[in-house]
Amino acid sequence: MTNQSRAFFALDFGSATTAGSVLGLVGGRWRLIAHAAMPSHVDVDAMLAGLLTQVGLTDPEMLVELGGSADIPSHVATWPRLAARTTPPRRIAVLAGSRRQRRRLELAALRAGWLVVGGSADEDDPVVLSRLALSTETGAVLLGADRSPGNDEKRHLPDLAVLLAAVARCRPELTVVLAGGAAAYEAEFSAPRDAQPGYELATGPTRAVPVIGSSVAPVESTTEKAPVRTKKASKKAAAAGQAAAGDSPPAYVAKLGGGVTESAAGATAVAGANPPPVASMPLPQASVGPDFQPGSDRGVSAYVLLAPDAEAGQPAGASLQQVLEGLRAFPDDSRLAVARSIASLSYVLDRSIEVVEIGLQGGLRSRSEPVGQGHFAVVSSHACLADASFAPENPSEEAIDGVLAWSTTVLDRHRVMDRLNDLRLVPWGEADGDGAAFRLAAAKAACGRLVDATPEIAVHPMPELLVAAGGVFAAMPPSVVALALADLFRRPGVSQLASDQARLLGPLGVIDDEAERRQLMANLADDILMPLGSLILPAGVRQGRSAGSLRLKDGSSNSEIELHAGAVQVVDLPPGRAARVNLDFRDAVRLGNRGHRFSVDVAGGLGGLLVDLRDIPLRVSDRPDSRRAALDAWQRGMWPEIDE
């Protein structure tokens, strides 16, 4: 069934808030008309009706042009909706023959967004390992080994396979992943009473994790992957998987030529020409989401998935990470959709882009950049992290230390624990005054954990565009978000800063077809991201004296500013303005290349131009009082109304 329209809704169903936007065909191209965010318990139809009411009050002719009438209830009921949603956290138990292998497997599972508990046969006894797998909080078990297991784990694998097979027979709903050399013990999980289930081998560069019990198509990719084998699901299991995939909000097709079309299968696309190939680490569609419940009446005791070892892929572990992401996430998972949107936006803008997204149930860091002759392809890397929540459910000592390190107010460890628990219970409460400052500290601590978990992204140069996404950043002043990005992403270079204020990256990333997604991104590129300004971050500035001077040429005007080492200096440069900056340093510094004089182009934003002359990495006193004073001084310059 096809539903044509000149407008549609984009929805991001988060754990704490729901963001809604109205997008319409104006002047022959898709534009963002209005957007808002509400607590997740607020009725979505009421929020959308409020948005259309504001559009009608501002420009009633536009509302009639988009919908054919001014009947707002009819528009809310009939306009298509493009939706993404956050996948609730799930726990996976990691079992291995050696501590070395367990750590590799845990890293892949953590980067795939799982809550991870683990054990190894050389450190833990069978009772401890069986308890990890038998726990009702455990939704999946990963047993892995090297592709050719070494002696340190080979002697333990038979016992681990027998133990896990016994657990699987006690818990028929359990999902079992056998990675690398552990796949040789697949026969342990076959029940002798039923020989019907067969096997399907997925090989070659054009297949991702096979979809079992789901209507989602495999992901196209030019990246070579190790063969992945899966058990065929029975009809009942397939029906259960399709029902789980169908739980997600409906997705829609947005055609630039005139209208949005609902897809009968729930897939999304924007009509357009075929794009050049995308060479990247696969950004997977979810294969089996958390609602999947395999039937217990099959001849197999558990749902068994065979996966590559923890060293396969580029970077190492990427192939296993993709399998585990497909197992964990909904087909319309917003975090993976953001990564897909950034890859498409990188191609459209022909720029290297990094995004950091922080939410209540975890975080995402992703990088995409054009490569090859003519920039015909995009290379991408990403990692999800459940521990990157700004309010972890069970915060570790390291998480509490991180909040204390970024806090500008006096707090003890017990008070931090209480406030994190309160923030998780009521994430939209206390958003001003001292509560706003605590939110900022919690968000920066979560972002810091995400940065520490992605060293393979940190080795790249500073991106041309750095994006902050997620509800916690959307609720903060733009200048404060710009300073937070400068505090956390400290690599020498020049970068433009932006924020996904309307939270469109998630819904747009749900679109399946790469060409169609790119065309919609090209239309909305100016509307998707709110400009925060530009960041100039040199390395090697000597502290304690004048660093040099900056000359800014903005149109017909010129201004000169003295640079002070150890400070963050803000130059007024409003959105929509571009300027040429000439930098003359007293000492040789690194800003891309090493030298004394540089000339760079910058763009304005709500936070202006930030010239950060602090150390790389950022060095702040270990004394709590001195640290809080320094952080408060930097923050107060960007957020003077915090005490009002």
Image (cartoon, rainbow, N blue to C red):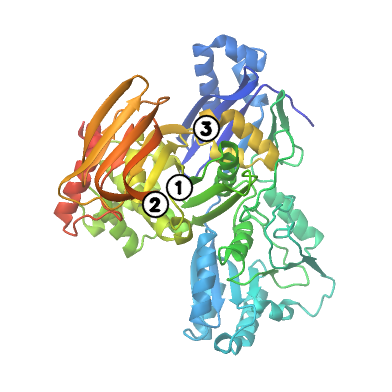
Foreground pick, 198 / 375: 375
- Give the Cα distance between marks 1 and 2: 7 Å
Relative side of 101 to 403, left or right: right
Q: Are marks 1 and 2 in contact (CB under 8 Å)?
A: yes
Q: SS of the residue at dot 3?
A: helix
Residue 133 appears in the rendering: yes
Identify the residue under disc 3.
Answer: 528
Q: Quadrant of residue 174?
A: bottom right
Q: Secondary structure at mark 1?
A: strand
Question: Where does residue 56 sit, x and y in percent of width and height?
Answer: 54, 14
Left or right of residue 333: residue 192: right
Q: Which mark is residue 356?
A: 1
| Residue identifier under label 2 | 447
Name which residue type carries label 3.
Answer: Ile
Q: SS at mark 2?
A: helix
Mark 1 in CB contact with mark 3 (< 8 angstroms) = no
Compared to residue 65, the image places residue 309 above or below, namely: below
Return the disc, 2 or 3, that comes first in the chain's sequence. Answer: 2
